[in-house]
């Protein structure tokens, strides 16, 4: 073998060994592979989607509301964001997830795929998706594994989203305790979280506004809500970045916090994600956003109704809402794999 040929062979071997090893070894599905057929019956998916407003004529961006772990979508949004959007005459839809949003998030992902496709078909423009806690993360499952949905979404707005899981559920120990599927899946080291963030966290053409609070006691560390990779336009913002004295924590940042509301509205009403330079500091003095009415008895009834589901989330083997209990994280579906 000549010296020139020997050098070429060595260079070739080095290049082969160093060329995108993470991509070559990735166990997850390619990011452009078409998503699988939905397994949840269409009638069930249709019944779970509640919509309001004039989708064909409104000039405002339609928005899909995605609930948090342990609550129904009514408990999460009927007393805050739904009235706010209705007052704006903004078209909106809300998804009623099974099992108080405590079931397998892979199943919830199918509800989101159906909702995205349905809303885009009835609208004159791409939609936005906004969610709280699990709801601030799970829409990304649909976007990751059903690539056709990416062209239908203009904005993703997460409030305390569990985008990288949480270290705050140490009581779930495989083979020792039982927890609900969605609780297992939101652990910081969950297979679900690894699959969700495989390939890229964001997608070209979509703007991401990730709002979190530094006082979050559920999604920990709080910065795990932030996004960084991919081609989407991203704003990661703690409420304390715009209102230094902000004190609202995990539950309230996604329900009554006016700073979070103003940031979300900024993203909805402008091209791209929320921009901190447009935030009016006068908004920091308001205790709640325009959709919240402290005189509304229904608000307190919704909060009381949510209590059993929320109480069931942090405690292993403790279940007040009849959601399934499993001894370990649900296995990843075949469509997530290469």
Image: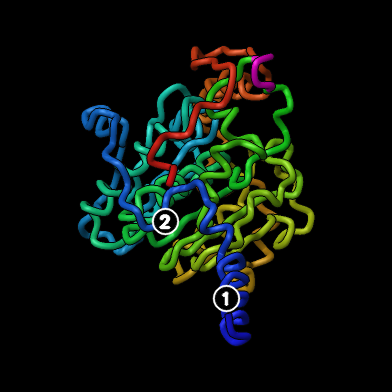
Q: Residue at x 37, y 41 (%)?
A: 112
Residue 144 in the image: above or below residue 77: below
Which mark sits nearer the N-terminus, 1 or 2? 1
| Percent position of residue 188, x then y | 67, 39
Around disc 2, counting alpha carbons within 10 Å, would you say few (fewer than 14), some (14 to 19), or many (20 or more)? some
Q: Which residues are magenta?
A: 173-177
Helix, strand or loop under label 1: helix
Q: Circle 2 — which element?
A: loop
Residue at 67% in and 63% down: 282
Which of the 4 image quadrants contains residue 278?
Answer: bottom right
| Residue located at (25% from left, 34% from top) | 46
Residue 237 among those drawn in magenta: no
The x, y position of residue 170, in whole percent, is 74, 27
Pick the residue in front: 193 or 213.
193
**How far apart are the two marked residues, 1 and 2, measured between alpha carbons?**
32 Å
Task: Name the mark on residue 31.
Answer: 2
- Residue 9 bears which disc, if any? 1
Horizontal placement of 87 versus 57: left or right? right
Quick check: 189 left or right of 150?
Answer: right
State the residue lying farthest toward the right. Answer: 245
Residue sticking out furthest to the bottom: 4
Asked whether 63 or 233 is in front, the reply is: 233
With respect to residue 308, does 35 lie above or below? below
């Amino acid at each position: 073998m000549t010296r020139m040929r020997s050098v070429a062979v060595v260079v070739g071997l080095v290049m082969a060994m160093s060329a995108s090893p993470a991509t070559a070894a990735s166990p997850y599905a390619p990011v452009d592979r078409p998503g699988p057929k939905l397994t949840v019956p269409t009638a069930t998916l249709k019944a779970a989607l509640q919509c309001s407003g004039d989708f064909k004529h409104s000039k405002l961006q339609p928005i899909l509301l995605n609930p948090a772990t342990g609550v129904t979508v009514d408990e999460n949004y009927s007393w805050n964001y739904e009235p706010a959007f209705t007052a704006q005459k903004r078209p909106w839809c809300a998804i009623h997830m099974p099992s108080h949003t405590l079931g397998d998030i892979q199943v919830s992902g199918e509800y989101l795929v159906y909702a995205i496709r349905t809303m885009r078909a009835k609208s004159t423009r791409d939609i936005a998706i906004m969610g709280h806690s699990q709801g601030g993360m799970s829409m990304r499952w649909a976007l990751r594994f059903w690539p056709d949905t990416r062209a239908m979404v203009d904005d993703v707005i997460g409030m305390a989203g569990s985008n990288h899981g949480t270290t705050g559920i140490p009581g779930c120990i495989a083979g020792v305790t039982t927890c609900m599927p969605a609780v297992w899946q939101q652990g910081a080291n969950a297979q679900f979280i690894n699959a969700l963030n495989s390939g890229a966290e964001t997608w070209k053409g979509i703007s991401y506004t990730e709002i979190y609070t530094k006082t979050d006691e559920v999604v920990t560390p709080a910065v795990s809500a932030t996004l960084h990779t991919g081609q989407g336009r991203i704003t990661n913002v703690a409420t304390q970045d715009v209102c230094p004295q902000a004190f609202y924590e995990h539950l309230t940042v996604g329900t009554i916090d006016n700073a979070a509301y103003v940031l979300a509205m900024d993203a909805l009403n402008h091209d791209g994600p929320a921009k901190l330079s447009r935030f009016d500091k006068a908004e920091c003095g308001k205790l709640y956003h325009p959709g919240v009415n402290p005189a509304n008895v229904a608000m307190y009834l919704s909060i009381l109704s949510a209590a059993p589901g929320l109480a069931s989330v942090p405690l292993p083997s403790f279940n007040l809402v009849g959601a399934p209990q499993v001894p370990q994280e649900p296995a990843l579906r075949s469509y997530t794999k290469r």
